[in-house]
Structure formats: C-alpha cells, structure tokens
C-alpha cells in the first residue's frame, strides 16, 4: 500500500471520527428535551456523513467499486448470513425496550455511516487505486474499522472495548467480502445497523459474556479469549465466501 493511500485512509477515518463527535446536542438541547436532542444529534451528523461520502465517491470515481451504484441483486441472499451467525446471539432474550423505532433509526443511520465510510470510500479507494489482492484490501479495511473503535476506551471499560475491537475486525472482514458479492453498500449499512440494534439489547447473550473489569486480570484474559473463540466461526464464513468469490471470478 502506498503512502498516498495510507494518508487518504487516515484522513477519511479521522474526519469521520471528528464529525460524529461534534457536540450538536448542546445546541439542540436549547430547543428539545435532552434525550431527543441526543437522538437528533446522531441522526443529523449521520446524515451529513452519508451525504458527504456520496459526494466524495462521485468526485473520486469510486461509486461503483464502493458499492454506491451498480448493485448485484442476484447475491442479496448472502446478506442473511450475518443475521444467522453471529446474529443468533443477538436474538437470545433481547430487551423489549431495544425495539423503539427512534433507537432503531439511530442504529441504522450509524450502520450506514460506518459502511459508506469504511467499505464504500476506503475499500472502494483501495479497489481502484491499489494493486492489492481482494483479501488484502478487505483485511486492511477491517483493521482500520476495528481500530477506529479504540476511541471507546474513553467511555467504556477496557475488557468491553477489546472485545468490541475483535468483533469489529471479524465483522469488517465479513462485510468487506459481502460488498464484493452484492456491490451494495446501502444494503450492508442497513444490515449493519440492524445488527447493532439487536446487539444493543440489554438481554443479549453477548453482553452476558463480558464482565466489566481490569484488562490484565486472569478473568479478563479468559473473557477476551472466550469472546474470540465464540466469534471465530465468522472467520470461517469469511474464508468460505472469499474462496467462493475467487471461484466465481475465475469462471
């Protein structure tokens, strides 16, 4: 990967992380209730990121490779895979309160934001400008996507964030290969958002795996390893889809 590509990726990632942290709610709270102001902040900033990503993809000529246009509906059935695994964990005793329409909208907007930025813009850029293998491009994008979640060390305990980094990397691989099949970043974003919504349920089985605490304790290490093993089948699914993609390309 060239220095130019690295600079572009870091710039896009930094811009995205800065935009979604803008304190718009501090202004909205002057007019709306605090809870509503927080929701509106996420919807406004998310919509701006999506709009800016769409414009950037057109300017850079990566609309097709980033999955913004020219979808492949024949492969849409594969989008059900994340809902089967790891989605099965999210459907284990979900909290009823997690299905509020406004909360769902926020999660879908955030899912769309992350997909248009990481799979649409960054992976689309790598597919067009870098002589990388399919696996390399997807892996780089997944790693950047995972590392961007490190900002949560500010808000959450270390064990939860490390597990989140692992999960983000696994799902980054899966969504990356699914982009190659579907060429529809919008559909991936909706899928991503719904999964986030389901996993946010207080009763989710995944949340019961992680007990908050010190990252360097024996119990914390055991939890992280357990988490990595439980979600490792996602890697097997990714490798199977990658092989299937290469087979289709060679025909």
Image (cartoon, rainbow, N blue to C red):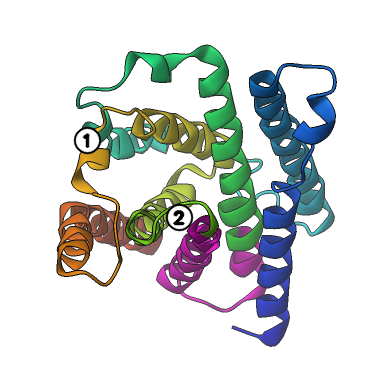
Identify which residue is drawn at 53% across, 45% down.
183
Identify which residue is drawn at 35% across, 57% down.
245
Q: Secondary structure at mark 2?
A: helix
Along the line of sight, which residue is nearer the eye, 83 or 10? 10
Along the line of sight, which residue is nearer the eye, 16 or 63? 16
Image quarter in which the C terminus is found: bottom left
Give the alpha-carbon distance from disc 1 to disc 2, as whole Å: 21 Å
Classed neighbour count for the residue bearing mark 2: other residues with Cα under 10 Å, few (<14), some (14–19), many (≥20): many
> Looking at the image, how many numbered discs can be counted on the residues?
2
Kindly tell me whether residue 153 is visible in this rendering.
yes
Image quarter in which the N terminus is found: bottom right
Q: Position of residue 90 (x, y in %)?
A: 27, 32
Identify which residue is drawn at 16% across, 59% down.
229
Q: Earlier in the sequence, mark 1 or mark 2?
A: 1
Whether residue 127 appears in magenta in the rendering, the answer is: yes
Highlighted magenta segment, given as a residue range: 124-153
Residue bearing the label numbered 2: 176
Residue bearing the label numbered 1: 89
Q: Position of residue 128 (x, y in %)?
A: 65, 67
């Amino acid at each position: 990967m060239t220095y130019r590509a690295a600079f572009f990726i870091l710039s896009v990632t930094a811009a995205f992380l800065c935009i979604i942290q803008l304190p718009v709610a501090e202004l909205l709270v002057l007019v709306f209730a605090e809870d509503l102001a927080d929701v509106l902040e996420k919807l406004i900033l998310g919509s701006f990121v999506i709009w800016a990503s769409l414009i950037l993809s057109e300017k850079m000529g990566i609309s097709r490779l980033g999955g913004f246009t020219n979808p492949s509906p024949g492969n849409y059935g594969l989008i059900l895979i994340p809902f089967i695994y790891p989605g099965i964990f999210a459907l284990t005793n979900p909290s009823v309160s997690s299905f509020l329409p406004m909360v769902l909208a926020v999660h879908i907007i955030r899912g769309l934001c992350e997909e248009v930025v990481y799979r649409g813009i960054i992976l689309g850029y790598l597919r067009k400008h870098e002589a990388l293998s399919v696996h390399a491009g997807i892996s780089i994008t997944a790693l950047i996507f995972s590392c961007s979640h490190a900002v949560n060390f500010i808000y959450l305990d270390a064990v939860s964030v490390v597990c989140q980094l692992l999960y983000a990397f696994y799902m980054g691989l899966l969504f990356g290969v699914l982009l190659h099949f579907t060429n529809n970043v919008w559909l991936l974003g909706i899928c991503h958002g719904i999964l986030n919504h389901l996993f946010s349920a207080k009763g989710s089985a995944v949340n019961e795996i992680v007990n908050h605490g010190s990252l360097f304790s024996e119990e914390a290490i055991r939890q992280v390893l357990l988490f990595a093993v439980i979600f490792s089948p996602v890697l097997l699914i990714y490798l199977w889809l990658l092989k299937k993609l290469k087979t289709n390309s060679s025909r």
